[in-house]
Amino acid sequence: MAPYRMSALELNELKKQLEKLLEKRFVRPSVSPRGAPVLLVKKKDGSM
């Protein structure tokens, strides 16, 4: 299955959010061949 396409802005935001979650230890790196799709939705103020 091909990965989902993301804009540069979405990819940058995803990387920032993942770094924060890794620092807080809410998530951890994985080598699983399975993954979960990610959906980014803009808030009313325009941020993600």
Image (cartoon, rainbow, N blue to C red):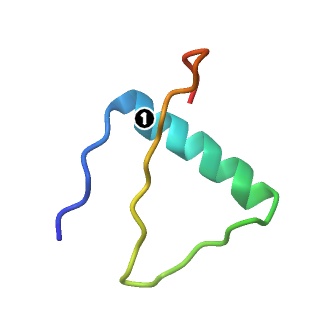
Q: Hey, which quadrant is residue 36 in on the image?
A: bottom left
Q: Hey, which quadrant is residue 26 in on the image?
A: bottom right
Residue 46 vertical placement versus 23 (above, below): above
Quick check: 22 left or right of 4? right
Q: Residue furthest right?
A: 24
Q: Residue furthest bottom?
A: 32
Q: Nearer the viewer, residue 10 or 45?
A: 45
Q: What amino acid type is highlighted by mark number 1?
A: Glu
User: Quarter of the image containing the C terminus?
Assistant: top right
Residue 25 vertical placement versus 43 (above, below): below
Crowdedness near tag 1: few (<14), some (14–19) or many (≥20) residues, C-alpha within 10 Å: some
Q: Hey, which quadrant is residue 1 in on the image?
A: bottom left
Quick check: 1 left or right of 28? left
Which residue is drawn at the image coordinates 39% and 61% (left, top)? Answer: 37
- Residue 30, given in percent of the width and then of the height, sits at 54, 78
- Residue 27, given in percent of the width and then of the height, sits at 68, 68
Q: Residue furthest left?
A: 1
Q: Would you name the residue on which mark 1 appears?
A: 10
- Residue 17, given in percent of the width and then of the height, sits at 63, 45
Total numbered badges shown on the rendered structure:
1
- Residue 16, given in percent of the width and then of the height, sits at 61, 41
Which residue is drawn at the image coordinates 42% and 39% (left, top)? Answer: 11
Q: Which element type, helix, strand or loop, lies under badge 1?
A: helix
Q: Nearer the viewer, residue 43 or 26?
A: 43
Quick check: 6 left or right of 44? left
